[in-house]
Structures are given as C-alpha cells and as structure tokens.
Amino acid sequence: MSVRSCRALVLLIAALGWLTGCTTAPITGRKQVNFVSASTETQLGVESFAEVKRQHKISQDPAANAMVQRVGRRIAAASKLQADWEFIVIDEPVVNAFALPGGKVAVYKGILAVAQNDAGLATVLGHEVGHVMAHHAGERISRSTLVEAGTEALAAGISSDPGTRQTVGAMLGAGATFGLVLPFSREQEYEADQIGLVLMARAGSDPRQAIGFWQRMQAKAGAGQPPEFFSDHPSDANRIARLQSLMPAALKEYHPAP
C-alpha cells in the first residue's frame, strides 16, 4: 500500500469515528495503534458470542459451571473492566478457552482436566481476559482486516453472511470455535501471559501455579507441538521461561483469596 493510500485509509477510518489512535496496553505499557473503538469491539464480541452459543452445546455440569463462574468472576473483578460478564462451559473435549470483548468468556470442558484446580483455571482465564484488557482484537483487526478488506464489513458489524461472521469471530479470539486458525501474534500472546499473571495474583490465585499449568500443557502437547518458529504462539518452554522471569513482580500483587 502506498503512503498516499495509507493516509487515505486512516482519514476514512477517522471519518467513521473508529480511530482511537495510539493507545497503551495495561500493565505492560506497550504502545499500540488501534483503529477500532472499544464500543465497536464490544458490539462484535457480543454478536460473535451469540453465534458461539447457537453453534455449540452448553454444558449443564454443575461442578464445571461453578468452577468457571467462581474463578471467572474473580478474574473479572481483578481486571476492573466494566462489562456485562457472561461465562459459559462448552460441552466439548477441546483444550481451549477464549474471552471476547464485552466480557463474554467461553471455556471448553476439555481444558478443565488440564487446569485441575482454581489456580490452573485462573491461569487460563487471566490470559484470555488479558487479551481483552489489551484490546488485542481491535489491534489485530487494525493490522489486517481494515487494511486487507477495508472498513465496509466492520461498519456493518457481523453480517448475515456465515463467512463474515466466522472471520470476525476468529479475529476476536474464537478461532477454534469457528474453525479458522487466526492466532494472536507472539507479541500479543506474551503480553496476555504477563497481564494474566498479574490478574490471577490480584484475584487471589498463586501465580506460581501458572508454571505447573503450562508444564501440563507442554506434556499434553508432547512431540505434536510445532516449533515456535512455525507458529504465532510461543512454545510452552519459552512461555514458561518468560513467566518465570515475570514471577517476582507478580508475587508482589499476590494476596491469597480468603
């Protein structure tokens, strides 16, 4: 894209009222360029979550739901995000979870066995809510969708076209649900780890338990996990090393839940 075209696109986005400019990610202080407003992010997140609930069976397991609600509410409170929080358990053996803008959180039942306990689940949910706190969805859409596809699809929200709904939902962080692999960048993954570590500590979960969770994930992946070079996600080994380096700061935020 030429400089002139890029400037024209920025002016168009500004005219639509979406340009939020240069922002700063919480906790990490990283500078971001995000062309998507928080209200637009929330609208897309809410609409994508409704689609998720239409497409998947929601678990009625009382123990699983109680655990997700208990841990999720603590993480939500620690995040201080003003949102209409909603937590669901998807009755599928997938080892995954995601949080969408607007406080919409889904946990696949398969990840609960890896989490094992509240601290393990706090690791997962802290990370996912960290993506929302840092507006990674808007940043990712700004980097790709607005440049590659223009602004028309976003201006209309999630259209009636299934392909559009899938793409936007995946861009927001629900890639596994919509069958599309659109991962956050490694930079955003590491940032969500850092934010999540602080969130779980503030929520009363021992951040040192995050190491055990990722070690269990590493063991589950085994030899089937691709090298980090070939993936936008950090390898579990590198993720663990980074978390260990961040642990002293996280422990300063830690006060055990009563």
Image (cartoon, rainbow, N blue to C red):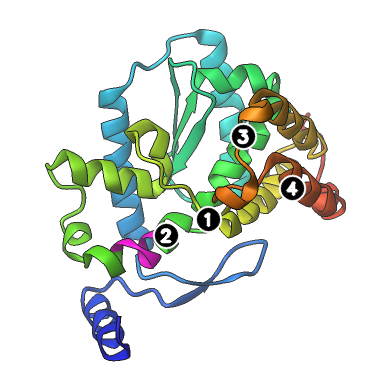
Question: Disc 2 or disc 3, which is closer to the eye?
Answer: 3
Give the residues in magenta.
140-145
Contact between marks 2 and 3 (CB within 8 A): the answer is: no
Relative to 107, residue 226 above or below: below
Q: Position of residue 168 (x, y in %)?
A: 29, 48
Residue matched to label 2: 140
Between marks 3 and 1, how big is the CA–CA gap? 17 Å
Quadrant where the N terminus lies?
Answer: bottom left
Residue kind at label 4, given as amino acid type: Asn
In this picture, residue 127 sits left or right of residue 201: left
Identity of the residue drawn at 34% across and 45% down:
45
Question: Disc 3 or disc 1, which is closer to the eye?
Answer: 3
Residue kind at label 2, given as amino acid type: Arg
Between marks 2 and 3, how big is the CA–CA gap? 24 Å
Residue matched to label 3: 225
Residue matched to label 1: 185
Residue matched to label 4: 238
